[in-house]
Amino acid sequence: MIVCPNCNHQNPEGATQCEACYTPLPATMSCPNCGASVQVDASFCGQCGFDLRQVASKPDPAIAATVAGGGTLPDVPDLQPDSESELESLQVELVEATEPIAAPATPPIPDAAEPAVTGSSATQLQGTTAALLHVQTDTTIELSPQLTVVHLGKPGGAVPPDIDVSGFPSSEIVSRVHADIRIEAGLYYLEDMGSSNGTYVNHIPLPPGNRHRLRPGDRIALGKEDKVTFIFQAG
């Protein structure tokens, strides 16, 4: 099943758009390590943790086989002009390309009465802050802007957690490597990493290998019965 990233509707395999809201569905492929269904742009398999970037970085098999066998790559077309007219045309284009470019206009000097915005202030205005509010204890945990992947879980697993929930009530239902929040182009995506008791978004289960784009107010539950719950906040 392919879960719609917009409305969480479960669509059949092979579907290209959501049956409920007609949102285009992410393309999927099989993990080369365990065969689980994962999105083609995922970096890791949500079932076994296989690094899918290894597959994307491999060279073209046909080119590799040609070079290894002592063969030669396809010839590059000859770019030499076939006639004097073509040569003259190339010379004209070269002269036009090397003509001096007019200097850009000098930007206006800001009014002394209006303070200029410094680079650090502009960065602060453009940046997006995000946090998780733990419902059961009313505790706010800010997500570090330096991280591109935030691991949720408990110590002792294969991947150390960036957000350790072992100190929260009912943390026994949370797996050591439970879920990840990935930040891509300023957007936040939630993935279940094959946890024992599952990950839920707005009370709907999130299948391993799929990811959900988080929006302010989304309710994230690690495990069943809504015992370890966070509210996603961004602004």
Image (tube, rainbow, N blue to C red):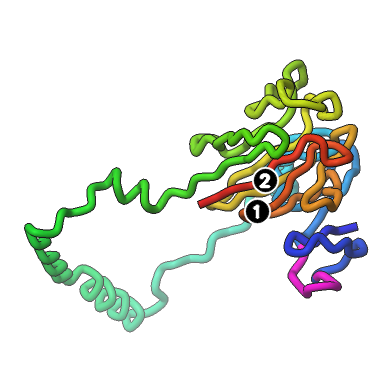
Q: Is residue 214 above or below residue 45?
A: below
Say which label, 1 or 2, has the lower sequence index: 1
Decide whether residue 39 is among the magenta residues.
no
Alpha carbon separation for disc pair 1 and 2: 6 Å
x, y (%) of residue 48?
84, 34
Instruction: Tell me which segment is drawn in magenta.
Output: 18-25
How would you classify the magenta stretch by its main secondary structure? loop
Which quarter of the figure has residue 228?
Answer: top right
Q: Are marks 1 and 2 in contact (CB under 8 Å)?
A: yes
Which residue is depicted at the point 7% across and 58% down? 112
Three-letter code, disc 2: Ile
Q: Is residue 172 above or below residue 8?
A: above
Q: Which residue is mark 1?
A: 217
Q: Is residue 102 above or below residue 127?
A: below
Relative horizontal placement of residue 214, taking residue 29 as reference (left or right): left
**Is any part of residue 70 visible from this angle?**
no
x, y (%) of residue 83?
37, 79
Relative horizontal placement of residue 81, taking residue 111 as reference (left or right): right
Three-letter code, disc 1: Gly
**Is any part of residue 104 visible from this angle?**
yes
SS for dot 1: loop
Q: Please name whichever residue, 234 or 162, is drawn nearer the observer in this view of the structure.
A: 234
Which quarter of the figure has residue 159?
Answer: top right
Decide whether residue 22 is among the magenta residues.
yes
Q: Which residue is mark 2?
A: 231
Which residue is depicted at the point 86% across and 68% down? 15
